[in-house]
Image (cartoon, rainbow, N blue to C red):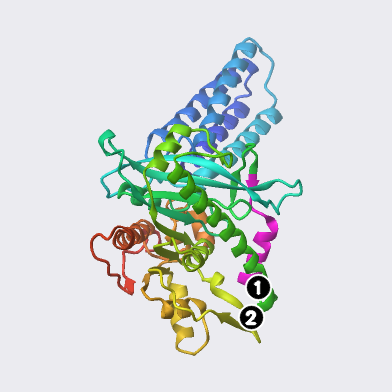
Amino acid sequence: MNIVILVLLIAAEIMLAVIGISRKMIVKDFVKLRVAANIVELVIGLLAVITKQGSLSLRFGGLLALLVVRAVFALIFWFVDHKKTTGKKKSSVILGVVFSIVFFINSIIPAFIFSNYKGLPTSGEYEVKTVNAILKDESRIETFEDDGSCREVPLYFYYPEVEEGEASKEFPLVFFSHGAFGYYQSNTSTYMELASRGYVVVSVEHPYHSFFTKDTDGKVVIVDPEFISNAGRIQNTDEVSDEETFEITKEWMELRLGDMNFAIDEVKRAASENSLNDSWYCKDLSEMSEALALIDVETIGVMGHSLGGAAAVTLGRERDDIDAVIDIDGTMIGEIDGVREGNDLVSEEPYDVPLLVFDNVEHLNERVDVGSSNILYVNNVILKNATTGYATCIMGSGHMNYTDLPLFSPLLAGLLGTGDVDPEACIAKMNEITADFLDYYLKGEGEFAVEETYELPQDKDHG
């Protein structure tokens, strides 16, 4: 449909040029025709927005803004030039059409990148509220900056909206860590589902590991280029030795664990004391106080996607206040203690916190193949030594199918790695399993069992 809209807009411009040139129009007649063409184009843009194809804020917002501006300027030019009887130059007509087509193409690009995703329905009894803050960790210098500033950690809370009579209720606390080049909203459907079922979820953003974020000064902080480069080298080439890989990933984990430990400690303190200290930068103080008042600091889960999942697993081992851990398609690199003669050294200590692991199909096959060949693979070791460990795979899934990105931007998700499973069915099933696991191990409710694999419908775009 996006192609159809673009073709219609281009066709209107070409038709304008053909009529203007073939009839050798004078200026006043051409500007009248230009007004008519721009109004037609604006109507096309409006139809795109009011139908299911449109989204004013993202997909077609830029295009519609351009069409409105063009229509306004066309009316202005008509007012100025409606009496001119000189001939309209062919070159200016052609040039105007070329510029218009270029503007159309640039403005409609978001419509091809993003979808109409509005979020998934939640199954819980609560409506969900949100509030956010940025925490300043004065104990750590921001190593990505050279001004001596401290590390800042943005937190995004998703929590149940309770009635006045339920204000004394307390809910389990769940922390989420996004993947490499991710974003705090990477698994919004998961946060919303959990919050609707009675959890306070805190999505922790990791500046310079996230695609972009903002600091307390309002400055946009983008992902670190060296982080991108190293991740690409480790993932896609053989030029990085095992020893260098260990040192690089060790730095990644130290940053993640520093952020997560600081976030957990500060949220627990603030909730217990019902107060925010100078570490907190928060505009919505009343909403933040409301969220903190709902937290049961004695019941905590941690989870994350990819690199965030690896951090969650290590947190579960290192902290004694973590009651459940979920690793969403992450290699547990934080559990690797070193490298010797090309082999990872992995802790054989028991893993005592209930652990749930999601694998995509490729990772499942790798884990099974490695397990049958006596080659040490960290995820297999941890799961083997877990007192309570579960691993499951949604068949047809790719790495990004365990996030909301395939629903929000199928194009970008495809470039980063998706399978042929229906993306909505996949993330909905993951959210269901996640909530059931946390219900059992954080709330003591219901029963929990998980299958090794799940067969779900295919993505219709994959046939």
User: Would you say 339 lies left or right of 272 here?
Assistant: right
Question: Within 10 angstroms of label 1, few (less than 14), some, or many (20 or more) residues?
Answer: some
Q: Residue furthest top?
A: 83
The residue under label 1 is which amino acid type? Answer: Thr
Identify the residue at horizontal 49%, vertical 84% (top origin): 370
Question: Within 10 angstroms of label 2, few (less than 14), some, or many (20 or more) residues?
Answer: some
Tag 1, which secondary structure? helix
Q: In the picture shown, does residue 403 fall above or below 355?
A: above
Q: In the picture shown, does residue 393 fall above or below 134?
A: below
User: Would you say 462 lies left or right of 449 here?
Assistant: right
* Marker disc for residue 339: 2
Q: Are marks 2 and 1 in contact (CB under 8 Å)?
A: yes
Q: Residue furthest right?
A: 146
Q: Position of residue 110 (x, y in %)?
A: 53, 44
Q: Which is nearer the N-term, disc 2 or disc 1? A: 1
Separation of residues labelled 2 and 1 (CA atoms) = 9 Å
Q: Position of residue 332 (x, y in %)?
A: 52, 71
Q: Residue furthest front?
A: 273
In magenta stretch: residue 424: no
Over which residues does the magenta segment extend? 221-237
Quadrant position of the N terminus in the picture: top left
Q: Is residue 170 visible?
A: yes
Tag 2, which secondary structure? strand
The residue under label 2 is which amino acid type? Answer: Val
Q: Nearer the viewer, mark 2 or mark 1?
A: 2
Q: Nearer the viewer, residue 83 or 358?
A: 358
- Chief secondary structure of the magenta portion: helix
Quadrant location of residue 235?
bottom right
* Marker disc for residue 245: 1
Q: In the picture shown, does residue 86 fall above or below 54?
A: above
Q: Position of residue 250 (x, y in %)?
A: 63, 68
Identify the residue at horizontal 49%, vertical 53% (top origin): 264
